Amino acid sequence: MSDAAALRYQNPDKEKRAVPLDCCGGLNNVDFSKMDLTLIEGLLKLTNFQDSSFCVAVAAIIFNPFFWNVVARWEHRTHSLSKLFGSPYLACYCLGFVIILLNVYRSHSMTVAMKAQAKWEVMDRTDVFYAGAGLMVLGTVLVVSSFLALGFTGTFLGDYFGILMDEKVTGFPFNITENPMYWGSTANYLGLALIGASPVGLVLTAIVAVVYKMAIRFEGPFTELIYQERSQRRKRE
Ligand SMILES: *[C@@H]1O[C@H](CO)[C@@H](O)[C@H](O)[C@H]1NC(C)=O
């Protein structure tokens, strides 16, 4: 008897709430109401929140968007980096390079935390592995295509350096989601956590998603403002 079948056998009342999903073959015996609870309980039980590698990863996840927003707004206000480097383009390239390094470090620290903490045998299955691989392909497509659509300065806060896009990019992948870079990166981390069968990976991915959501709320209106200012300048000219 499979685990799911055993659960239902012990708790026949749950039978009615089991969701039949014919399209998913092996999943049609899983009781999702039970699974949600088990998932969250398992995640919290299996994650060691006091582990130093976990704390380092959380710090990196929170620090990165904080850093680039603070630096970019400072630059927009004072043009200090453009003056220092002698050119807004060079300044933007340097900030972009630092952001890339910070994000590499964030990925590294998440991988270290995942390796330091236990796998979860519930997730250690072929279908979960393939779902993770699929998410990583999707995430990479979103990240790479938005980089190609925006270019280097468009990706790395060029607007704040006065390097504005000619017009808003609306083609793929921006016709799928407003912030393909952020959600693509989140999909990559979720995929990594699934492939590694890592409960701490899932917790860290959730933190990435929350932090990105906050960053988008903070950045969105400011970027709009920069472009509004330009269209007002153009009207005056
Ligand atoms: C987004 O744009 C691409 C390329 O222009 C197109 O193939 C795709 O169907 C569009 N997707 C949506 C959801 O509009």
Image (spheres, grey):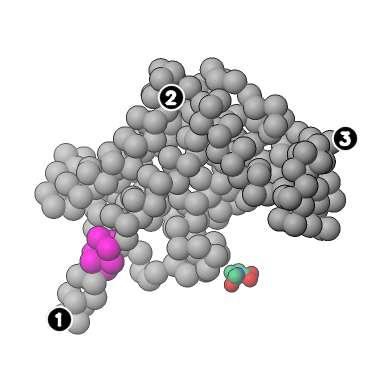
Q: Is residue 158 above or below residue 63?
A: below
The residue tagged 2 is: 49
The three-letter code of the residue at mark 3 reads: Met
- Between marks 3 and 2, how big is the CA–CA gap? 35 Å
Q: Position of residue 190 (x, y in %)?
A: 57, 41
Identified at 54% across, 17% down, the residue is 116
Left or right, residue 84 beside residue 13: left
Left or right, residue 8 beside residue 151: right
Task: Report the disc number at residue 236.
Answer: 1
Q: Position of residue 127 (x, y in %)?
A: 76, 41
Identified at 71% across, 39% down, the residue is 128
User: Label 1 CB, ligand 1: below 8 Å?
Assistant: no
Q: Quadrant of residue 105?
A: top left
Identified at 18% across, 53% down, the residue is 76
Task: Report the disc number at residue 16.
Answer: none
Identified at 39% across, 24% down, the residue is 55
